Amino acid sequence: MVLGAAFLGAIGQILFKKGAEQFTLSLQILKNFYFIGGGLLYVVALIITMFAYKKAQVSVLYPIIAFSYIFTIVFAGIFLKEPITWQKIAGSLIIILGVALTNT
């Protein structure tokens, strides 16, 4: 459940990045569908996370949200054409190891 929230949060980040290109602090923000979409995904991810917190320990669930960093790297590579470097891959592997260690 929390992994799904991390996935949605990562998509939200990509939408925020796309929305940042046309971001202004005015009523024009209501026409920024990337910004609004990113915000809605964050709200859905938050609701999913809250339901998960009702059923499990936060010390187990919250590290899983770190997977959003990995999802964001992959999505940024695919949708924003950002480079996926060996440093990003190494960092992702460390995150996976950390999540595995905290959930044992």
Image: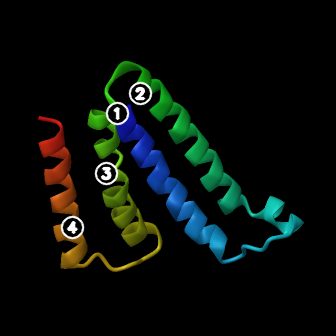
> On the image, numbered disc 2 is attached to which residue?
53
Query: Residue 1 lies in what quarter of the image?
Result: top left
Horizontal side, residue 92 vs residue 82: left or right = left
Q: Which of the two marks, 2 or 4, is nearer to us in this view?
A: 2
> On the image, numbered disc 4 is attached to which residue?
91
Mark 2 or mark 3, earlier in chain: 2
Q: Which of the two marks, 1 or 4, is nearer to us in this view?
A: 1
Mark 1 or mark 4, earlier in chain: 1
Q: Position of residue 60 (x, y in %)?
A: 26, 34
Crowd around label 4: few <14 · some 14–19 · many ≥20 (10 Å): some
Seen as rendered, the residue at the extreme top is 55
Q: CA distance from mark 1 to mark 3?
A: 15 Å
Q: Residue at x 37, y 53 (%)?
A: 68
> On the image, numbered disc 3 is attached to which residue?
67
Q: Which of the two marks, 1 or 3, is nearer to us in this view?
A: 1
Q: Amino acid at mark 3?
A: Phe
The secondary structure type at the circle numbered 2 is helix
Q: Position of residue 27 (x, y in %)?
A: 88, 65
Question: Contact (CB < 8 A) between labels 2 and 3?
Answer: no
Crowd around label 2: few <14 · some 14–19 · many ≥20 (10 Å): some
Residue in the foreground of this view, choosing between 53 and 48: 53
> On the image, numbered disc 1 is attached to which residue?
58
Mark 1 or mark 3, earlier in chain: 1
Q: Residue at x 58, y 61 (%)?
A: 15
Residue 79 sits above or below residue 49 on the image: below
Mark 2 or mark 1, earlier in chain: 2
Q: CA distance from mark 1 to mark 4?
A: 23 Å
